[in-house]
Amino acid sequence: MAVDPIPETSPGTAAAETSAARKAELRQRIRAARRRSPSPMRDLTPNLLRLLSQLTSGVPATVACYLAARSEPQTRGFITAVQEAGHRVLLPQVRADGGLDWADAAGAGERDSGFGVPEVDAAALPEGALREASVIVVPALAASGTGARLGQGGGFYDRTLADRALTAHVVAAVFDEEVIADLPIEAHDRPVDWIVTDRRILAVTPPTHIQ
């Protein structure tokens, strides 16, 4: 009796499947740890403000940030301090197609996005507004010293970072133990330039590709 051949799996496909599986395991583990951790007591605001001051040299700038969910590194104190320092702040809104719109934080409230995260309650700015931001603070479950970022899995920020200004500094906000040396990456993942934790500020060092 003839036996159907086993479909061949390319090395690239196998590697992608391995990375996806590792990401899923890491997400599960980090989310569980965050549920146990008193995150409000671990404030990243001082380090975020230190880095922002360094990147902007005190000159008013446009800063994009996220509104943190309960288990994430909190950003509301940082957002308030940034506005008080004279910077403009952009906050995200989640679109049904999985993309992000951006709106001015000035005078705006917040609401539930329907995706389990809060979003700004204000009129969305025209497409391309993120390109005005010189500093972009993004949520992450983990980040590596080479710039890899582990998100929640929805791809919202990987898609939106494709539309940023090339000169913008992308900053991942994580708790210190979530800086992981060997973080799996996939082709669609967008790297970060800086990592800020409750204990330190890290400039990432992208891997060198030998020609």
Image (cartoon, grey):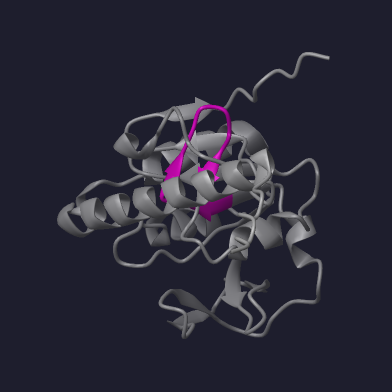
- Where 62 falls versus 146 (above or below)? below
- Where 163 falls versus 11 (above or below)? below
Of 61 and 134, nearer the camera is 134
Question: Is residue 158 rendered magenta in the image?
Answer: no
Where, quadrant-wise, is the C terminus in this rendering?
top right
- Where 14 falls versus 201 (above or below)? below
Q: Residue at x 63, y 62 (%)?
A: 2
Of 64 and 28, nearer the camera is 28
Q: Is residue 85 visible?
A: no
Q: Residue at x 46, y 66 (%)?
A: 67
Question: In terms of image quadrants, where is residue 40?
Answer: bottom left
Question: In terms of image quadrants, where is residue 77?
Answer: bottom left
Q: Position of residue 207 (x, y in %)?
A: 65, 22
Left or right, 58 with reference to 41: right
Where, quadrant-wise, is the N terminus in this rendering?
bottom right
Left or right, 32 with reference to 196: left
Question: Is residue 139 rendered magenta in the image?
Answer: yes
Of 178 and 165, nearer the camera is 178
Q: Position of residue 190 (x, y in %)?
A: 66, 47
Q: Residue at x 78, y 40 (%)?
A: 167
Q: Is residue 176 visible?
A: yes
Q: Position of residue 152 (x, y in %)?
A: 46, 60
Q: Residue furthest front?
A: 1
Q: Position of residue 146 (x, y in %)?
A: 57, 28
Left or right, 204 with reference to 81: right
- Where 96 falls versus 187 (above or below)? below
Question: In terms of image quadrants, where is residue 132?
Answer: bottom right
Read off the magenta span: 137-149
Q: Residue furthest top?
A: 210
All told, the count of numbered labels is: 0
Of 80 and 140, nearer the camera is 140
